[in-house]
Amino acid sequence: MRSSEAPIWIPAGLDAGAGQGSRTDRPQQHADSNMKDKDRGETETTELRRIIRRGSSDVVTMERARDIANCRRREVTLVLKTFHTLKTQLDISSTGATNSTSTAIYNLHTQSDTMAGTGAGGFSTIAIIGAGSVGCTIAHTLMLRRVCAEVRLVDIAEDLCRAQVQDLQDATYLTNVRIKYATPQEAGQSDIIVITAGAKQKPGETRLDLIEKNYKVLGSVLKGLQPINPQSIILLVANPVDVLTHFAQQMSGLPKNQVLGSGTLLDSIRLRGLLAQRLEVCIPEIEDSIKGRPVNIVLQISDNSINAYVIGEHGDSQCVAWSSVTVSGAHISVIDEISDEDRTKIGKLVSGKANAIIRAKGFTSYGIGATAANICEAILFDQRPVYPLSCWHEEYQCCISLPAVVGRKGIVSQIPLPLNDKEKAQIEASAKTLREQIAKF
């Protein structure tokens, strides 16, 4: 039995009836301190939920969210340690009230992890399968943006992978994000598994030309990851991404919403960049102070103000959904009447940009690295943006890129996109091409 002269501090949140000993001998100052801690904790938890729900990507806001999440996890760990100390000192039985208290603490710990986008390990992890140019660029971007606590790199070429990890570790002092070499089994327990492994697209090759080689690679990768964490999200980046996403949904054992591909998000970003360069907004009736006459000021529009989607296959059969292109809510035709000929040229520039880069330097990495990291961030923090990602569409009986809401459970929902008859025919033709390729396997 404990002495009344040696009161034990009980953290806020523990049930008053958890132990058999009386709490009346605890100093009032401890009770006041606990109440303040509880109020602060509830306030910070509410703030964190609001940040996550808002989906802000502001650097200061994101840093605040991470600080709160880390603080709450540290406090939960302290509660767990203190509970075990109390159990020993008070000789509490492992039945009855103790079970309800320990369950409540465990639920609090789980809730803290869930709010911060973390898994059962207590911190967020992203595994990257493939330590080549694309995989390492994704790892580097994740680290610089502090998307997760730990990045795990996996590759069949172990020496290369370890060297890449050591190189990346030299840059971790900027963010304190851990970079480690991992086994496939460790990678399979991560919150997000990014698959980049596969044959590279060579100059003159289409993405569909890679199917046979990368189908075998994908099967080997998924087999090595087993058993996969049932809460994991698999993000396919390797090409042909739509076909491989379809196969991964079949082979992984995960629900279809938890297996998605990067799709045409990068193509859509390229499209917005080209449109931003083309579009000009004229602001009339500005008086020239020197000549004393009205003049037009020409401003280039930010690509972030343009809402435009490339849809269909991430490849040669993709198409631009011109009927739904808007600039801050205004249809693009209000600002610039783009002719059919120019629309065709822009579409070809978008679909052919990767080949142009590959011909010059042999591969692409920065664009897809930023895109993949952005998708991972949206998943871990449940930001729920609308991206054109490759996912299963019942209507087309294949994985194809159309606007979808992405969050902590992967594909949360799909957004119907208004298309004209020409665009509907194009996406149906794109889906048919994909179904034909899938049928060969």
Image (cartoon, rainbow, N blue to C red):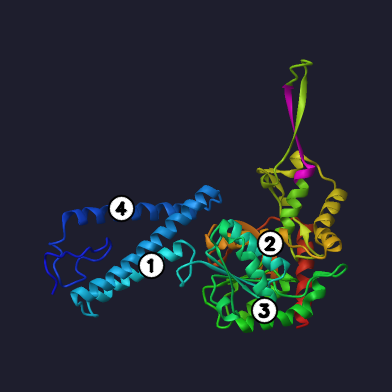
**Residue highlighted by disc 3:** 158
Of residues 293 and 43, which is closer to you in this image? 43
Q: Residue at x 38, y 53 (%)?
A: 44
Ranked by sequence position, the earlier of labels 4 and 2 is: 4
Question: How busy is the neighbourhood of tag 4: few (under 14 within 10 Å), some, or many (20 plus)?
Answer: few
Residue at image mark 4: 39
What number is the disc on residue 369?
2
Report the predominant secondary structure element of the magenta stretch: strand
Lower position in the chain sequence, tag 2 or tag 1 = 1
136 lies left or right of 280: left
Badge 3 or badge 2: first in the primary sequence: 3
Q: Are marks 3 and 1 in contact (CB under 8 Å)?
A: no
Quadrant showing the C terminus: bottom right
- At numbered mark 2, what does the secondary structure look like: helix, strand or loop? helix
Can residue 392 be seen here?
no
Sequence-earlier tag: 3 or 1:
1
The residue to which callout 1 is attached is 109
The residue range painted magenta reads: 276-286
